Image (cartoon, rainbow, N blue to C red):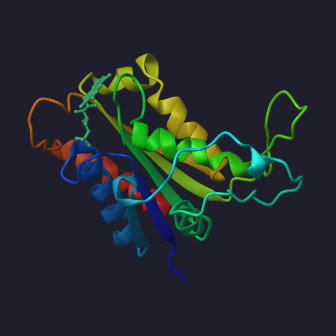
Amino acid sequence: MSARVVAIVGSYRESGATELAVAAVLEGARAKGATTQTIRLSECPIEFCANCRQCTQAPGGERGRCRQHDGLEQILAAVESADAIVLASPVNYYNVTALFRRFLERLLGYVYWPWGQNGPTLRCKLQPRKAVLVASAGMPGFLIPLATGAARALRLAARMLGAKPVGQLWIGLAAGKPQPTLPARTLKRARRLGMMLA
Ligand SMILES: Cc1cc2nc3c(=O)[nH]c(=O)nc-3n(C[C@H](O)[C@H](O)[C@H](O)COP(=O)(O)O)c2cc1C
């Protein structure tokens, strides 16, 4: 059976560097027979986390349900049925975008954190799916994991979603033109990473 790869994109625009890279990753996955889906957070009706922690109170391995009924459930259902995921965001103000952060905060149902316990415990430590992490920024790419919180936020999201990163694409110098293009070697690397997900 073909692998199912779901990409979650925290960019504000379709033709940006982040989505160009994600498209290349998914192209690579499809070349190896995977079926792919792109979820643009900019198009998803997702509320902010209310910090009520209702989703964290019941013990057990099962994800706690949010009291807000919005687009989140559909995204998580897609992720949970996937064999691999791509998590992607531009770097804005040294971190993932507010769009991606809002999504990340809504993943709290994956932890058990009853009142009276100082910190959360991940409900399930298994990482049955693979992940590729993608970030784009104006700064040189090698600085993204060193000088920003974006890599950490993407890794954390992968962990919450039960995914083990098998590769990352830190795309730097991406803010020089209104319509960015990616160098051929970046696109090639993106496709190769996609093949690893299939
Ligand atoms: C509000 C805003 C904040 C940004 N902050 C940073 C930053 O802190 N560091 C950086 O290197 N680039 C920063 N950038 C540049 C973006 O990360 C870069 O243009 C990115 O490739 C945009 O992604 P997109 O093409 O997918 O939209 C910022 C851009 C905007 C609009």
The picture quadrant where one finds residue 134 is top left
Q: Residue lying furthest top in this view?
A: 147
35 or 189, nearer to the observer: 35
Is residue 44 toward the left or the right of residue 55 in the image? Answer: left
**Picture residue at 27% right of the left edge, 22% below the top:** 140
Is residue 184 toward the left or the right of residue 90 in the image? Answer: left
Residue 99 x/y as whole percent? 41, 43
Answer above or below: position of 84 versus 144: below
70 or 16, nearer to the observer: 70
The picture quadrant where one finds residue 25 is bottom left
In the rendered view of the protein, which quadrant contains the N terminus? Answer: bottom right
Residue 164 x/y as whole percent? 61, 48
Is residue 57 toward the left or the right of residue 134 in the image? Answer: right
**Picture residue at 40% right of the left edge, 58% below the top:** 194
Quadrant in which ligand 1 is drawn: top left
183 or 20, nearer to the observer: 20
Residue 147 x/y as whole percent? 42, 16
Please say whether residue 150 is visible from this viewpoint: yes
The picture quadrant where one finds residue 78 is bottom right
**Picture residue at 75% right of the left edge, 56% below the top:** 64
Residue 36 x/y as whole percent? 41, 70
